[in-house]
Image (spheres, rainbow, N blue to C red):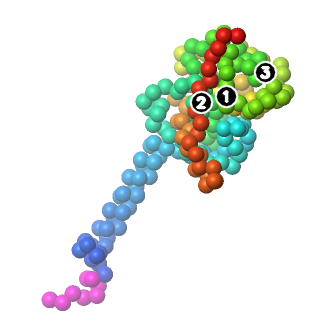
């Protein structure tokens, strides 16, 4: 029996009905979207708060997976929801871990009595004109993380908004993917503590 034109149109090149091929593609796309939303999110850097590590107008891919397996570490660049606008995700660096006591004097941070050496800060950081407004002592609870900006002149971090709990940390910044000339892994450098 000869096949009609309609029958031929309904069968894909592999002998499957066209609707079945389209359904398989939709299911596969749905699985990819679900996996992406479970393991990743992304955000746009809106300002210079994380300079020089991240710059305004860069887009960053954030992995949700690391903190499902381990706790955030000092030096990690993490994503949290903005406390004023929770639809916006912002990036900060973990400086204080649960149980730490932090002393901040301008740009110098000490953890449990030992000053931090932070290689990711802007050079010439003493010229940032950070004065008495950034002096404080913070004692962290057992689920508290103290997050600071790499650009310490920008106070939009734990100095202004308080500590973050582990479940408020969305994920770990992973990859700068836009603009294309800036594609690179995000630098997670651990500060070192040294005797004063």
Residue linked to disc 3: 106
Q: How many marks?
A: 3
Residue linked to disc 1: 119
Residue at 70% across / 19% down in the picture?
109
Which segment did they paint magenta?
Answer: 1-8
Would you place residue 33 above or below residue 175 in this image? below
Q: Quadrant of the C terminus?
A: top right
Q: CA distance from mark 3 to mark 1?
A: 16 Å
x, y (%) of residue 89? Answer: 61, 40
- Secondary structure beneath disc 1? loop
Would you place residue 79 above or below residue 25 in this image? above
User: How packed is label 3: few (under 14 Cα within 10 Å), some, or many (20 or more)?
Assistant: some
Q: Quadrant of the N terminus?
A: bottom left
Q: CA distance from mark 1 to mark 2?
A: 8 Å
Q: Residue 52 got which mark?
A: none
123 within the magenta span: no
User: How packed is label 1: few (under 14 Cα within 10 Å), some, or many (20 or more)?
Assistant: few
């Amino acid at each position: 029996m000869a096949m009609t034109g309609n029958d031929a149109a309904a069968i894909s090149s592999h002998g499957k009905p066209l609707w079945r091929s389209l359904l398989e593609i939709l299911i596969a796309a749905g699985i990819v979207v679900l996996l992406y939303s479970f393991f990743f999110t992304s955000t746009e850097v809106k300002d210079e708060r994380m300079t020089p590590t991240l710059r305004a107008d860069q887009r960053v891919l954030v992995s949700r997976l690391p903190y499902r397996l381990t706790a955030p570490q000092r030096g990690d660049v993490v994503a949290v929801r903005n406390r004023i606008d929770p639809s916006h995700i912002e990036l900060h660096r973990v400086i204080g871990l649960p149980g730490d006591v932090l002393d901040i004097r301008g740009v110098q941070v000490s953890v449990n009595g030992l000053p931090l050496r932070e290689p990711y800060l802007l050079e010439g950081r003493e010229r940032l004109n950070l004065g008495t407004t950034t002096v404080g002592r913070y004692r962290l609870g057992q689920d508290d993380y103290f997050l600071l900006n790499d650009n310490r002149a920008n106070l939009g971090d734990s100095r202004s908004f308080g500590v973050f709990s582990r479940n408020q940390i969305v994920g770990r910044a992973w990859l700068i993917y836009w603009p294309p000339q800036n594609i690179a892994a995000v630098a997670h450098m651990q500060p070192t503590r040294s005797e004063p």
